Image (spheres, rainbow, N blue to C red):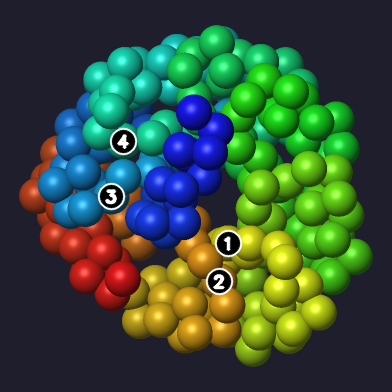
Amino acid sequence: MRENTICKIEENKIIVIVRGVAKDKLIPLAEAMYKGGIRLIECTYDASGKVSDEETASYIEMLSKHFEGRMSVGAGTVLSEKQVELTAKAGGRFIISPDTCESVIKKTVELGLVSIPGALTPTEVETAHRYGADFVKVFPVNFMGPSYIKALKAPLSHIRLLAVGGIDENNMKDYMNAGACGFGVATGIVNKTAVADGDFDAVTRLALKYTEQL
């Protein structure tokens, strides 16, 4: 299962970050993205605590059951082992964090999920890999640019890097050419106005702008 998820990430490349979307809009939103070619979705935990971890896990479970066999669902903003455990029980397939935390990475691997911690410096990237990460999320990459990915890949060619932060349909190819094997995309596809208005056809069109670049 874990190796299958790794292959899906390498193949489909785009993980859409879903944050702060009401439960009743999650399925139609995800279906709209699916129509646009998206096959990976990240449902984020709320670090502020306004939405409980258990509630977020229920969203992940709902999406996982609805899209079983069609789309891989994972968790984002994972900062604790408890959140990893909740995600695994909910049927999530991958764990994405903004940071490099040894205990979170090791718990993820232990439970058979794909580990994608966040890092920025060469030391952080290699440390994440050493702890057992399957991919490393270079974040926030928008302050560094594609040349930074290329610089990281020179000595760290053995590590699969995802570019996250400021990725859009116009710069994706630059990051791919620099060595990124995938991306995290948020508001570029999950347009808040479109979601609020229930204009899911607009979400499909936005998704296509990205998937057509692959």
Question: Residue 79, image x and y in percent?
Answer: 74, 32
Compared to 76, does 50 lie above or below?
above
CA distance for labels 3 and 4: 8 Å
Q: Amino acid at mark 4?
A: Met
Residue at the spot 63% in from the left edge and 62% down from the top edge = 160
Residue at the spot 36% in from the left edge and 22% down from the top edge = 64
Q: Amino acid at mark 1?
A: Leu
Question: Which residue carries the number 4 mark?
Answer: 71
Compared to 122, does 94 lie above or below?
above
Labels 2 and 1: the sequence-earlier one: 1
Compared to 213, does 112 lie above or below?
above
Q: Amino acid at mark 2?
A: Ala
Question: Residue 84, image x and y in percent?
Answer: 66, 23
Q: Are marks 2 and 1 in contact (CB under 8 Å)?
A: yes
Relative placement, left or right, of 147 versus 100 is left
Labels 3 and 1: the sequence-earlier one: 3
* Observer-nearest of 167 and 2: 2
Disc ID at residue 11: none
Place residue 136 in its image quadrant. bottom right
CA distance for labels 2 and 1: 5 Å
